């Protein structure tokens, strides 16, 4: 279980996957809980299919908006290669929640590099808490493959039991257009339930 | 009630609360969202100008007329606006004038990491630097007050981590401002030598008064926090936040006004602490000032002047410590993930053709700078906005001086051409150049996230507007060979480039196709590779489309990201690529 007194969440993914929205969603929920919160984003060049990270820091008083090496309690990875790329940003013994989806970077597409085939295996063997799931599949089941971000936030929410469900609801409404709310609410619930299923295994 | 605001959003909110009337800007990461958010306020006239010089002059005009005005730009934009900046420093203002500049240490999306604080120093214009969203809002309001009280433009300096970080800020209501009466005053606003000499005297006196003001802790701009007096740190902006994390026990003099610096506060602080340290990103701006005052201080001895600072760098450099971090059980080589042209990008056809023709490409600033990357490696140069056109002319003239001719084209986006490409084109025509300029007209300012520009037919508030006709514009400056081509008809496009390169006069090719991310662009279903027809030649891969990949020797198209633009169909000699019947 994680708590909001001091929670650093590093959200990593590929430009275009919706990491920005995820960070806004989490940040808004923390603010609704009366916590101090800072969110750092990167815009511009890196959004063009590059590796992107956003930082969400929650606590009683936050100074820097940036999560640096060894400072993240949780890495929320939208793509498995990005999970391993940013692993050194995780505290020793921290939690990685990763989508198992693979998106080939250009050097792999062009054949100049190889996509590592043992990422999940290595993460499993590492001294971290790991939740690996097919967030893309769950998002598709909810009605849109674009809802990967909200599925993953659902998984994180299942670990933040002190945040009441109505806060998540209110915060999701504040970042999602009304006509997309239904699909995203479903996606969030998929993520929320997925972790309990995982922990039973 | 407190709201989670992006730094840029908070600057817009602060300006709105301060009763700003006119805002003119040119987009540029990391400053763009200030003006985008500004446009949401109905009370404010807001516009995208063709470039930062124009934006600044519009704001100056509005301020002279008696309104509160603001212009926003990225660091390199201030170079473009430097001409009006140095002289409006002399004229001063009537209504308040705030110039927002966003630096990009670490170059997340920039071509250099210049330190804009030196502009404040050399133009003698006060500069404020906030350290979170609340201060972005508060300092913007204070900037307007300072501007009017001291008859000066005020620069608000942000960096990427301030502009693009969200933190909580208290909102207030807008206080509408009365228009200041306009009075003709040639001694103040007409900067001919006789008047300017007198105004220079005023500027120096004003700087002295502003320095006095900066000493006053009650203004809430510069602040002192005494803790342990063993170590005192002078810092500002985002570096203040890093300082609080790494040195929670230290005393801190936080500089909110980086020019003019508060000499008395600095001296007093220095006397009160045993060891004095400056933590600042980029150049030793504060450190050098303190050294000049004859005070012993250290800073750049520990911290780099290249790239951003962060807590890891600061902790390691000064304390020699590193936080424990998670380690992978086995070393996994993670291939880099550089930014790429999007699937369906209209620039892809252009760069495939140019790369294939092996011509020299004078490049420019925009998404299409990615044409320098693999697999195209087509772009030879990228210096600044508009440079593609004038540099191509310079290259052609240099070759001619030596009796050579290397086929050269300039590539420049529609917005960048409006910004400062047109002047280069005039130069080519006027000085009898023969260069070929390709305008990549994708109907939007793409790189910064889809802003309207003078060629798109819409204003920032999405009102309809007259659109500049690029063909007529090129013709009007004297280019006789102007043609519009579709970059997705690669055969025809190639022939067009070849023809224009052979012509012994200036030429313009307008490569017209809208950005694939625009909502009205619909290509239809994704295409597929018929594995039976595919001969595995790999030609389709040369397009560098992120949707095409090869897995276990089989070429495939990722349907989840393919937009169905069908450019790859043209690459396949065996008819293996197409939509399903």
Image: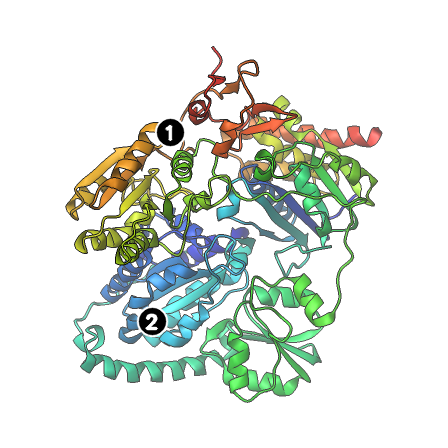
Q: Is residue A176 left or right of residue B86?
A: right
Of the numbered discs in the image, which one, if any, rests on residue B148? 2
**Dot 1: element:** loop
Mark 2 Cα within 10 Å, few/some/many (few <14, many 20+)?
some
Task: Give the position of the C terminus of chain A as an image quadrant.
Answer: top right
Residue A6: % across, % down:
72, 53
- Residue count near mark 1 (Cα–Cα under 10 Å), binned few <14, some 14–19, many ≥20: few
Camera sees residue B440: yes
The image shows residue A140, relative to residue B265, as above or below, that is above
**Disc 2 or 1, which lies upstream in sequence?**
2
Residue at (54% x, 59% y) in the render: B106
> Percent x, y for residue B491?
35, 28
Task: Give the x, y percent position of residue B366.
Answer: 41, 47
Q: Residue at x 53, y 74 (%)?
A: B284
Can you see residue B49?
Answer: no
Check disc 1 and report the residue beneath it.
B520
Would you say B501 lies left or right of A155 here? left
């Amino acid at each position: 279980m994680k708590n909001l007194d001091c929670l650093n969440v590093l959200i990593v993914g590929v430009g275009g996957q919706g990491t920005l929205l995820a960070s806004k969603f989490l940040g808004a929920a923390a603010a609704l809980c009366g916590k101090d919160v800072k969110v750092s984003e990167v815009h511009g060049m890196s959004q063009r299919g590059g590796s992107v990270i956003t930082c969400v820091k929650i606590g009683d008083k936050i100074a820097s908006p940036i999560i640096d090496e060894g400072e993240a309690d949780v890495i929320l990875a939208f793509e498995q290669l990005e999970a391993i790329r940013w692993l050194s940003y995780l505290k020793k013994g921290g939690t990685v929640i990763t989508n198992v989806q693979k998106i080939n970077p250009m050097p792999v597409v062009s054949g100049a590099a190889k996509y590592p085939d043992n990422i999940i295996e290595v993460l499993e063997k590492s001294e971290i808490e790991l939740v690996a799931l097919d967030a893309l599949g769950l998002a598709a089941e909810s009605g849109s493959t674009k809802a990967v971000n909200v599925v993953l936030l659902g998984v994180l929410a299942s670990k933040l039991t002190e945040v009441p469900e109505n806060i998540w609801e209110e915060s999701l409404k504040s970042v999602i257009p009304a006509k997309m709310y239904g699909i995203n609410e479903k996606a969030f619930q998929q993520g929320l339930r997925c972790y309990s299923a995982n922990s039973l295994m | 009630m407190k709201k989670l605001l992006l730094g840029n959003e908070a600057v817009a909110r602060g300006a709105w609360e301060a009763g700003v009337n006119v805002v003119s800007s040119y987009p540029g990461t990391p400053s763009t969202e200030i003006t985008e958010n500004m446009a949401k306020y109905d009370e404010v006239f807001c516009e995208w100008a063709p470039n930062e010089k124009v934006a600044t002059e519009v704001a100056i005009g509005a301020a002279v007329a008696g309104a509160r005005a603001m212009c926003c730009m990225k660091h390199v934009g201030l170079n473009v606006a430097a001409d009006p900046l140095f002289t409006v420093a002399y004229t001063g203002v009537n209504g308040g004038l705030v110039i927002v500049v966003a630096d990009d240490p670490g170059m997340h999306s920039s071509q250099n990491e210049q330190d804009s604080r030196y502009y404040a120093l050399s133009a003698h214009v006060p500069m404020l630097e906030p350290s979170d969203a609340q201060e972005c809002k508060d300092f913007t309001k204070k900037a307007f007050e300072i501007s009017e009280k001291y008859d000066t433009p005020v620069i608000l300096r942000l960096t990427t981590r301030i502009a693009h970080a969200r933190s909580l800020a208290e909102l207030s209501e807008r206080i509408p401002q009365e228009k200041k009466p306009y009075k003709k005053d040639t001694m103040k606003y007409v900067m001919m030598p006789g008047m300017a000499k007198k105004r220079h005297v005023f500027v120096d006196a004003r700087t002295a008064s502003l320095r006095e003001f900066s000493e006053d802790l009650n203004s809430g701009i510069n602040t002192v926090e005494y803790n342990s007096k063993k170590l005192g740190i002078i810092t500002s902006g985002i570096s203040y936040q890093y300082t609080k994390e790494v040195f929670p026990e230290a005393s801190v003099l936080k500089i909110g006004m980086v020019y003019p610096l508060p000499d008395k506060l600095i001296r007093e602080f220095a006397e009160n602490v045993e060891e004095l340290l400056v933590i600042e990103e980029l150049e030793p701006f504060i450190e050098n000032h303190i050294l000049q005052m004859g005070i012993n201080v250290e800073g750049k001895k520990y911290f780099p002047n290249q790239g951003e600072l962060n807590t890891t760098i600061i902790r390691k450099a000064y304390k020699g410590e590193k936080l424990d971090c998670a380690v992978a059980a086995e070393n996994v080589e993670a291939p880099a993930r550089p930014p790429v042209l999007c699937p369906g990008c209209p620039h892809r056809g252009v760069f495939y053709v140019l790369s294939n023709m092996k011509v020299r490409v004078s490049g420019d600033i925009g998404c299409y700078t990615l044409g320098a990357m693999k697999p195209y490696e087509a772009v030879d140069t990228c210096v600044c906005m508009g440079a593609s056109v004038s540099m191509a002319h310079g290259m052609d003239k240099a070759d001619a001086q030596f009796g050579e001719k290397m086929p050269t084209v300039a590539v420049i986006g529609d917005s960048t051409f409006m910004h400062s490409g047109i002047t280069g084109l005039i130069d080519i025509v006027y000085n009898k150049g023969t260069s070929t300029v390709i305008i990549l007209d994708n109907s939007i300012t793409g790189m910064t996230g889809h802003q309207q520009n003078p060629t798109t037919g819409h204003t920032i508030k999405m009102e309809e507007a007259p659109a500049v006709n690029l063909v007529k514009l090129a013709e009007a400056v004297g280019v006789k060979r102007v043609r519009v081509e579709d970059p997705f008809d690669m055969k025809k496009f190639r022939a067009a480039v070849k023809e224009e390169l052979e012509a012994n006069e200036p030429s313009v090719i307008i490569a017209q196709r809208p950005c694939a991310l625009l909502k009205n662009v619909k290509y239809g279903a994704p295409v597929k590779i018929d594995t039976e027809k595919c001969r595995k030649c790999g030609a389709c891969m040369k397009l560098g489309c992120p949707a095409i990949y090869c897995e276990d020797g089989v070429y495939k198209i990722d349907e989840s990201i393919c937009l169905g633009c069908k450019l790859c169909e043209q690459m396949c000699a065996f008819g293996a690529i197409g939509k399903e019947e």
